[in-house]
Image: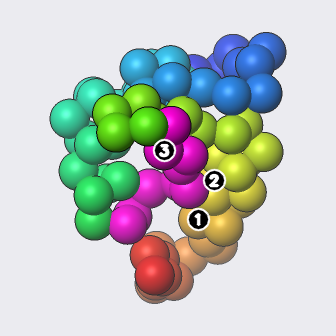
């Protein structure tokens, strides 16, 4: 994950993928499977991510042990 905290309230998939250190296809797969952060669909093709939702999603994945499971649902 990039150390640079975004200065925008809303991020594109390209910006979010770069921030998380993921490829855009990986972020696309996560979104289609319901495993990624919540998103906003603007029209038929435009996807946006709210920074506050991304932060909450990241925090929800925090664990103290590798035995902890991640509930993606």
Residue 33, image quadrant: bottom left
Q: Tell me the CA gap for discs 1 and 2.
A: 5 Å
Instruction: State the residue position of label 3.
Output: 41
- Binning the other alpha carbons within 10 Å of mark 1 as few (below 14), some (14 to 19) or many (20 upward) gives few
The mark closer to the camera, 3 or 2, is 3
Q: Tell me what residue is drawn at x 35 percent, y 53 percent.
A: 31
Q: Tell me what residue is drawn at x 46 percent, y 81 percent.
A: 73
Q: Total marks drawn?
A: 3
Q: Tell me what residue is drawn at x 44 percent, y 75 percent.
A: 72
Q: Tell me the CA gap for discs 1 and 3.
A: 23 Å
Question: Can the viewer see residue 66?
Answer: yes
For residue 68, side relative to residue 51 (left or right): left
Q: Secondary structure at mark 2?
A: helix
Contact, mark 1 vs mark 2 (Cβ under 8 Å): yes
Residue 5: x and y in percent read 74, 22
Residue 25 in the magenta stretch? The answer is no
The part of the chain drawn in magenta is 34-42
Secondary structure mostly seen in the magenta stretch = loop
Residue 19: x and y in percent read 53, 24
Viewer-nearest residue: 41 or 57: 41
Q: Tell me the CA gap for discs 3 and 2.
A: 20 Å
Task: Examine the rendered structure and indicate whether residue 29 appears above or below residue 15.
Answer: below
Residue 48, image quadrant: top right
Q: Earlier in the sequence, mark 3 or mark 2?
A: 3
The mark closer to the camera, 1 or 3, is 3
Q: Secondary structure at mark 1?
A: loop
For residue 65, side relative to residue 50 (left or right): left
Viewer-nearest residue: 45 or 21: 45
Instruction: State the residue position of label 1.
Output: 61
Q: Which mark is residue 58?
A: 2
């Amino acid at each position: 994950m990039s150390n640079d905290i975004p200065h925008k309230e809303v991020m594109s998939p390209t910006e979010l993928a770069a921030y998380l250190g993921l490829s855009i296809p990986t972020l696309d797969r996560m979104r289609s499977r319901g495993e990624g952060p919540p998103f906003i669909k603007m029209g038929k093709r435009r996807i946006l991510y709210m920074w506050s939702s991304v932060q909450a999603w990241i925090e929800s994945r925090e664990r103290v042990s590798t035995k902890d499971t991640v509930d993606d649902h």
